Image (cartoon, rainbow, N blue to C red):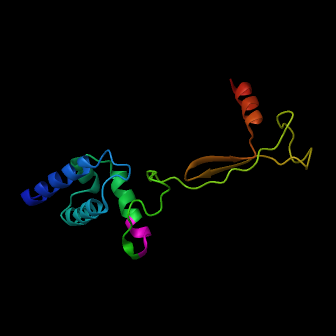
Amino acid sequence: MMTEKQNARVLELKGQIEGTAAAPSGAPVEVREAVLELVQELGRSGVTARALAEALGLHETTLSRWKRDRQAAPGGRRRPSDSRAAGARDAGFRVVELAAPQARSKPRTSTAESDPAVPTLRVAHAPSGLVIDGLDVESLVALLRRLS
C-alpha cells in the first residue's frame, strides 16, 4: 500500500514520463533514476514493480530494462543515448553480423553420412527461441511445402 506522499510522487513521475513519450530517447535519465529509487523504496513496503509500472502507465519490462541499463553502465549511471546510433531507440536488440549467402541449385536433402561435404542442420534451444544453423531459404521453402 502506498502512502499519500508516494502516490503524489507516482503521479508526478507519470506526468513527466507522459510528457516525454514522443521523444526518441524516451524518458530522461533523471526521471528513470527517480522511478528506480521509488521501485526500491516501495519494494521495501511490499509494493511490486509490476504494480508501480501499472500505476506509471509503463510495462514492468521497461523498469527491468532501465535497471539493467543502470547496472551495465560504468559507475552505475548511463544516459539513454550514450551507446545508440544517431537517435535510434534502445529496444534491447543485439548486434548481428550477416554472412554472405552461398549459392545452391537445389535444397539440401543429404545427410553427413551420405555426403560429408554437406553440413547437416544444427537445431538448438536458446533463450531467444529455436536456433537452426544451416537452414537456407530454399531448404526452408522445401520444408514448408512438405509440411503443408
Can you say whether 15 is above or below 147 in the image?
Answer: below
The mark total stands at 0
Residue 140 lies left or right of residue 4; in this view the side is: right
Residue 77 lies left or right of residue 86; in this view the side is: left
Residue 1 seen: no
Can you say whether 146 is above or below 113 in the image?
Answer: above
Q: Nearer the viewer, residue 64 or 21?
A: 21
**Where, by quadrant of the figure, is residue 8 drawn?**
bottom left
Would you say residue 72 sits in the magenta stretch? yes
Q: Residue at x 51, y 52 (%)?
A: 93
Quarter of the figure that contains the C terminus: top right
As drawn, which residue projects farthest toward the top?
Answer: 148
Q: Residue at x 20, y 62 (%)?
A: 42
Q: Nearer the viewer, residue 76 or 86?
A: 86
Instruction: Give the image location of residue 2, x and y in percent.
Output: 13, 57
As drawn, which residue projects farthest toward the left?
Answer: 4
Main secondary structure type of the part rendered in magenta:
helix
Instruction: Give the image location of residue 98, x and y in percent.
Output: 69, 50
As drawn, which residue projects farthest toward the front?
Answer: 86
Instruction: Give the image location of residue 94, x and y in percent.
Output: 55, 55
Q: Residue at x 23, y 49 (%)?
A: 56
Would you say residue 145 sits in the magenta stretch? no
What range is drawn magenta here? 70-74
**Where, by quadrant of the figure, is residue 65 drawn?**
bottom left
Residue 83 seen: yes
Residue 112 lies left or right of residue 11; in this view the side is: right
Residue 146 lies left or right of residue 129; in this view the side is: right
Quarter of the figure that contains the N terminus: bottom left
Instruction: Give the image location of residue 116, x and y in percent.
Output: 91, 50
**Where, by quadrant of the figure, is residue 81 drawn?**
bottom left
Q: Residue at x 22, y 52 (%)?
A: 16
Can you say whether 145 is above or below 32 in the image?
Answer: above
